[in-house]
Amino acid sequence: MDIKKMLVNDRVKPYLLKARYGIEKESKRVDLSGNLAKTDHPKSISMRDDHPYIQRDFSELQMEIITPVTETLEEQFNYLAAIHDVAYRSMGNNEMLWPLSMPPQLPEKEENIMIAKLKSVENVLYRQTLSNSYGRRKQMICGVHFNFEFGDELIQALFNTQSEIKDYRHFKTEIYLKATRNYLHYRWLFTYFYGASPSSEKNFFEEDSLNEAVRSIRNSKYGYTNSDDVQVSYSSIQNYLSDLSSMVKRGLLSEEKEFYSPVRLRGGHHVSDLADHGIRYIELRNIDLNPFEPYGIGYEQAEFLHLFLIYLLWKDEGENCDEWVKMGDFYNDIVALEHPLEHTQFEIEAKNMIDEMEHLAAILNLTISDTLFVHLREMLMDPSKTLAGRLYKESEKSSQGQVATSIAKENYKKLWDKPYQLTGFTDMELSTQILMFDAIQQGIQVEVLDRQDQFLKLQLKDHVEYVKNGNMTSKDSYVSTLIMENKTVTKKILQQHGFRVPKGKEFNDIEKALRSYDIFSTKPFVVKPKTTNYGLGISIFKEGANYEDYQKAITLAFKEDSSVLIEEFLNGTEYRFFVLNDKVYAILLRVPANVKGDGKHTIEELVIEKNRDPLRGRDHRTPLEIIQLGELENLMLKGQGYRADSIPKVDEIIYLRENSNVSTGGDSIDVTDEISDDYKKIAVDAVSALGAKISGIDLIIENKDVPAANNNAYGIIEANFNPSMYMHTYPYKGKSRRLTMHIIHYLFPELLQSQE
Amino acid sequence: MDIKKMLVNDRVKPYLLKARYGIEKESKRVDLSGNLAKTDHPKSISMRDDHPYIQRDFSELQMEIITPVTETLEEQFNYLAAIHDVAYRSMGNNEMLWPLSMPPQLPEKEENIMIAKLKSVENVLYRQTLSNSYGRRKQMICGVHFNFEFGDELIQALFNTQSEIKDYRHFKTEIYLKATRNYLHYRWLFTYFYGASPSSEKNFFEEDSLNEAVRSIRNSKYGYTNSDDVQVSYSSIQNYLSDLSSMVKRGLLSEEKEFYSPVRLRGGHHVSDLADHGIRYIELRNIDLNPFEPYGIGYEQAEFLHLFLIYLLWKDEGENCDEWVKMGDFYNDIVALEHPLEHTQFEIEAKNMIDEMEHLAAILNLTISDTLFVHLREMLMDPSKTLAGRLYKESEKSSQGQVATSIAKENYKKLWDKPYQLTGFTDMELSTQILMFDAIQQGIQVEVLDRQDQFLKLQLKDHVEYVKNGNMTSKDSYVSTLIMENKTVTKKILQQHGFRVPKGKEFNDIEKALRSYDIFSTKPFVVKPKTTNYGLGISIFKEGANYEDYQKAITLAFKEDSSVLIEEFLNGTEYRFFVLNDKVYAILLRVPANVKGDGKHTIEELVIEKNRDPLRGRDHRTPLEIIQLGELENLMLKGQGYRADSIPKVDEIIYLRENSNVSTGGDSIDVTDEISDDYKKIAVDAVSALGAKISGIDLIIENKDVPAANNNAYGIIEANFNPSMYMHTYPYKGKSRRLTMHIIHYLFPELLQSQE
């Protein structure tokens, strides 16, 4: 099998970079001073042992972040970032994640290192066993595991170029075995660049084993390794499995999964899957936490690993497999224990390998970051630019612990900066981001089926739910949303069910509308196009209208739509009721864009000040919008006898807009607890009459202290089938309502049952 | 109470023409020769005794058509027409409706007139009683009942102009009582214009009671009336009710409902409702079938009745109520028994009344048909223009029976002309029209909530279903339709469930799409914009493509949409599977617009010939579309070496289009029975994977005789959440599939249960 030739085959080339990735990343929870946290795993995170994204490793303090499998590194890092957001904000304000593989100062007594309080007795017992074999201190070392699978299309294309191996699974296994052996042989190169555990903190070593800083304690013999007796062959999958099982039989390993090789061969969830299915992917385990990346591993670093694996597949290997692997261990230990600022003794080999890799990338047309080889060469020439070198140098100014604490604090600040956003997915709608956050926290698997379209697949065990735009779900029927989309139909149905809606008529003919002047002229009424939603073409006559104005309004409305509604105008305040599964979860009052005078500042200054609120931004990327001072606002000011440079009196409220939309700078004020139950019942019953389960229904209430049963106490304006949720969660004033979480519990009621 | 003054009040005027209407119209079923039918009520119509639209009256042969209550006469006549369509087409090809009030020749023996075979024993017994009291012959007289209610806004406005009567219901009852008494007094005017039962046919009278033709046998003492002893006062609702109940006690009436006044006072379904609620509306019963209107009553006639009632409300009445009413009976009998071509002896009074009515319409600004008063004056001046006059004159040429038979035949032809349409609603989508037809037939109440938006409310007893576009219902979840709307999401989900979909990728970036050339270049593939549906921007490469063509195709597609799909192209034939509730109900093959040569005619002539099919029309108003010979078709011909004036050989098929859409003249061919169950199962399972209940799913099948389980036997192209239904019901070739009826049974499963 001439892999070199196979890789440059034109039928193979298009698929070379096809792959699937997954990351597991452990780190320790610490308090804001950098001391190990004394708390339990955060309760807000679902405590299931099989949480797909956030688990505990050996210790209760060790948070493990697990990404889903993705087919691009971009997606992989999006998830890594997003799950970090969830982990951080779930820990609360007083904790952060330690950015180093090596733990901060440990308790003097090893038994004070808390074993993870898992639900499964078996899982706790296993940790007990590890604790006995390796000691709890070593278990506190953290790292990154990088799961890597060559794209099936790639393996298939490679398979088709040869006829030597007839069985596809066998072929695939051979591919992975070669890459693995070479990885084990050459992994010292990775250790040189990305090793990042130069020193340990107090109480890690019982006695100081290492006097000098190194590149990677974790990847050296002082790290977390099996005893030297544990030897497993990578010459074939049969040998690998039989060696493993003999190690277990001989008591050198408690279970197969205790085998801590830098590369673990994976067939599926269990070691036995290897025998049945062959190798499906490999797990690279020799990755120290990168202190300079907020998520413990950098994008370029992952790209390096991918390219490195293709290179290792291409590169010749030694004839004696076991010897070749063993030599790798030897080289790696040397490099791991070199001083971080020292040039490596394999510098020439390293340079050759980098050159070869770059050449290979060129002949295979692989597209990778422009800077990768620049950085690799820089690190090679100047060891202080390697991760270990950088960390060591920075620590010289203070101490490694202090450097780590201040890095942790910076990450902490960054991850708390915009709590309404989910990093990695900030181009999506805010409500969808918040829903994804909650789903991740609850241990529900989140797959983005269509990013532009806000289309998610949520899965909890076998239970799948599809969600679009955060609240378009399987719970609402198609026709109920179509009813809500159509104002005339909504009104007819509500009226037939005895609710008060503004009386009115739909016109498809301008002449007929004009002839109906008599019916509307003397009462408050509004003329509006049937479907437009942006306020265009709407005229309000609060005290009736003369025929001329009536005619103008109708002409205006017919310019926007071929159907026009003329409706009774209802006096009062408009409230948005968010109804979910026959319950009101939030009520919002929306107030037009405004500022409050202080007798000192101009309106313009007050606007600038109010816009400083981090909740205000642009284009729905934040819960509130920047207040503008454009043409419309200036007109509105003029109408009130003001200009932008006027100075309003103390406590005087100046409105800058007629409309109360949050999207034009309006304030959102939660009033859920201030509205009485009878109005909530009206909202719930009306939504139910429309056959809907999720709806934002707008009620005009003349006086909320008057019972809803009173004559004309309320009127229903419209019902929205995709009501904004984030504005209830991050209101300008009042209590936050986590509607996305209610949606999740509605979609997955089993979550609440399992908590009981 | 000065009603005259009240009516001209400005607060009253806008509402004067507000009203609610309902029509009941009986007619006899006859065979195509005009003889009484010998068949039972059609089985295709739901046989429920309480069918809201189509019932049997006294006899099994008497079809009664009942419209729903509407607020405009336009809607009223739409329903009247639509229900006639359903009644006619349900009777089958061998029957029609007799257009006269007087029956055709009756059987010699009265007992051969079949009493309606109703389910309820009580209803049958009641008819038995009537048969004993009046004889079956008289029961065969048919007519129209016009139910009329003044708009609530009108009565409310009138009520508000006065303070004499404090109780609203009482006020309303007085309004109706005045109109009723005046109607009874002046109804001779209506009899003059619209009386239309001049002669009887054989065996109606046991002995010839009438030697000469009259205006209206039905409205004379020879018609269907109570015995002279039955006298009821209209002076107050109390007197009316107590008189009625005393008539029953004295055995003059078997029940209150046997009181056959020309005006029946209605409070609700039962006479007793009058005591509780007062008069809610009145039922005018003195209307002969209008032989010259296909539905038994004309629009102008209904307008006359409305205006007449307003006029009668306005007009002074005599002081002695009972005397006043009795005088009316006397006058009416005189007019009814006048010869149809004779001037009426009340001509001067009639002229004055018409003048008064026209004046009133003017001062009240009532908008009515311009021609109404023209026609009334014509009829007044020339009795041969009244209905009775016209019918009498036409009958002179042959016989009344022959005239009636030929009128019935014309109606029959008209109502069968476009069996896919529902008269009165032909501006709506074809599938919606067919669904409404089926609903009416099944006795489901149909309300059009929004005509332009194809939004229906269907109701069977308390069970309400809303339907838009014929198949958007409460059965599909919102998200499943959103899934089907999104091609990328549809494909991902189908793929995850193990179905074969064309492999491919979505691109949002033209550069990335270009870079993926290698992946697609060598295999058949298609480039298409993500959301467009009209074939714009689609390029198909059946044998791969060079880079230049690839680039062109991608640029083209990105012009149509910001997202572009590049997909594997599947070879085979595309079939549309219509899946409903986990079952395939129809499979359609769509063939591009084509003609078949005969060796004689040019392509243009063949197209003209093929377009003669009554199923072909324009703008989706017919099941098939006219084949065009425009630019595209001529190009397509040119590509094959033809022109429009070429003469194709015998049996040669000439295609005029590349695409197979029915909307561009394609043929639809039902192949439901030709596709094996394994493919049907694929369609059902795929729709189920999408969570959908109603879907038109498109499968490409390479060879339908090869099992679906074979490798690449099929591929799924897309699933449609609003699949066309009419194309399956009226295919170009093959069996008709009444999908709308399946939808109705799916929405209302109780229909099937009640049939069992």
Image (spheres, coloured by chain):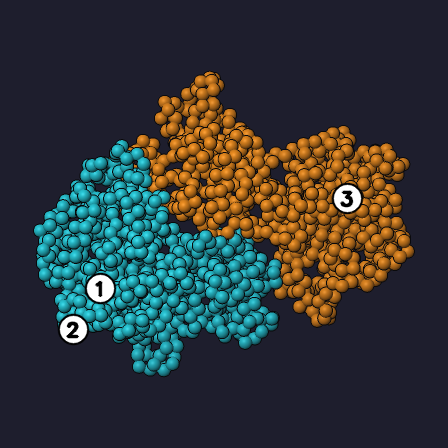
Chain colours: A cyan, B orange
Foreground pick, B432 / A320: A320
Q: Which residue is mark 2?
A: A398
Tell me the number on the disc at residue B428. Answer: none
Find numbered disc 2 in the image and state the secondary structure of the residue it sits on.
Answer: loop
Residues indicated by labels 2 and 3 sit on the same polypeptide chain? no
Disc 1 vs disc 3: which is toward the camera? 1
Q: Earlier in the sequence, mark 2 or mark 1?
A: 1
For the residues labelled 2 and 3, the Cα–Cα distance comes to 101 Å
The residue type indicated by label 2 comes to Ser
Foreground pick, A146 / A746: A146
The residue type indicated by label 1 comes to Pro
Residue drawn 24% across the image and 58% down it: A227
Badge 1, how many Cα within 10 Å: few under 14, some, many 20+?
Answer: many
Badge 2, how many Cα within 10 Å: few under 14, some, many 20+?
Answer: few
Lateral position of residue A721 relative to residue B372, left or right? left
The quadrant the N terminus of chain A occupies is top left
Could you tell me if residue B508 is visible in this image?
no
Task: Examine the image and state in which quarter residue B1 appears.
Answer: bottom right
Find numbered disc 3 in the image and state the secondary structure of the residue it sits on.
Answer: loop
| Residue B603, above or below A212 | above
Q: Which residue is mark 3?
A: B118
The residue type indicated by label 3 comes to Leu
Q: Which residue is mark 1?
A: A291
Find numbered disc 1 in the image and state the secondary structure of the residue it sits on.
Answer: loop
Chain containing mark 2: A
For the residues labelled 2 and 1, the Cα–Cα distance comes to 16 Å
Foreground pick, B330 / A590: A590
Task: Examine the image and state in which quarter residue A560 appears.
Answer: bottom left
